[in-house]
Amino acid sequence: MKKILLIAIALTAINLSYAQVKKSQDASKSNIEDFSEISGSLIKKEFTDVGKLRSIKIQLLKITNLTTNISESGLRIESQGVITHVAFLDADEIDAFLKTIDYITDNVFDTDPSGNYTEYNFVSRGGFSAGAFNYNKKWVFYMKPEKFSSDSQIDFNKEDLVKIKDAVLQVKGLLK
């Protein structure tokens, strides 16, 4: 009887841990991704190019559920290489991303990077990350569309950051 009880407890624990893993994987989607996957609906996706820098393409993505006539919009970032990686920032995350760019431009790139290794990281709800780190005694800005793929990271310098910010601001302006 004790063995059956222990097996039942073990199976329950395994089931609960699986549910937690599944829940955390689902939580790494942006709202715009969730909206685009509504079953039983006809979904229209409109992509507006606003900028391209190296292998990164920045777009406005507008998704309309034609069944309900409700729309969601956000920022789409595509990294083009051997494998194409795509990330989405919901409209409510764009200001935080712009603040990250401003902070790094104004407060990080002008500091001496020869001290302790330091990182600055922004992470969206969908798993996109961006930030800065010091490497070989200089600051590097990075964008990483795919959370679990090390080859999706693209590094940029301070001048590139201005172009990225301009493209993100253009998307923000189109959201209104």
Image (cartoon, rainbow, N blue to C red):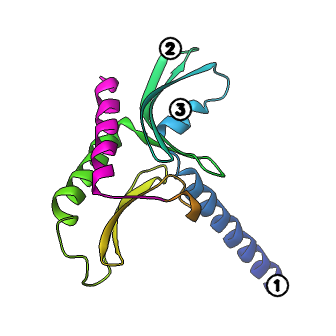
Q: Is mark 2 on a helix, strand or loop?
A: loop
* Circle 3/circle 2 CB separation < 8 Å: no
Above or below: residue 44 compared with residue 76: above
Which quadrant holds the C terminus?
top left
- Of 117 and 68, nearer the camera is 117
Q: Mark 2 points at which residue?
A: 69
Specify which label sits upstream in the sequence, 3 or 2: 3
Q: Indicate the amino acid at tag 3.
A: Phe
Q: Indicate the amino acid at tag 1.
A: Lys
Q: Which mark is residue 78?
A: none
Q: What stretch is highlighted in magenta?
A: 154-176
Judged by depth in the image, the label closer to the viewer, 1 or 3, is 3
In the shown orientation, is residue 85 left or right of residue 126? right
The answer for how far apart the CA atoms under marks 1 and 3 are is 46 Å
Q: Which mark is residue 3?
A: 1
The answer for how far apart the CA atoms under marks 1 and 2 are is 56 Å
Above or below: residue 131 compared with residue 119: above
Residue 149 in sight in this render: no
**What residue is at 49 percent from the left and 54 percent from the top?**
127
**What residue is at 50 percent from the left and 14 percent from the top?**
69
* Circle 1/circle 2 CB separation < 8 Å: no
Q: Name the residue under label 3.
A: 35
Question: Which percent across, then down, holds residue 133?
Answer: 34, 70
**What residue is at 33 percent from the left and 24 percent from the top?**
174
Judged by depth in the image, the label closer to the viewer, 1 or 2, is 2
In the shown orientation, is residue 116 left or right of residue 7? left
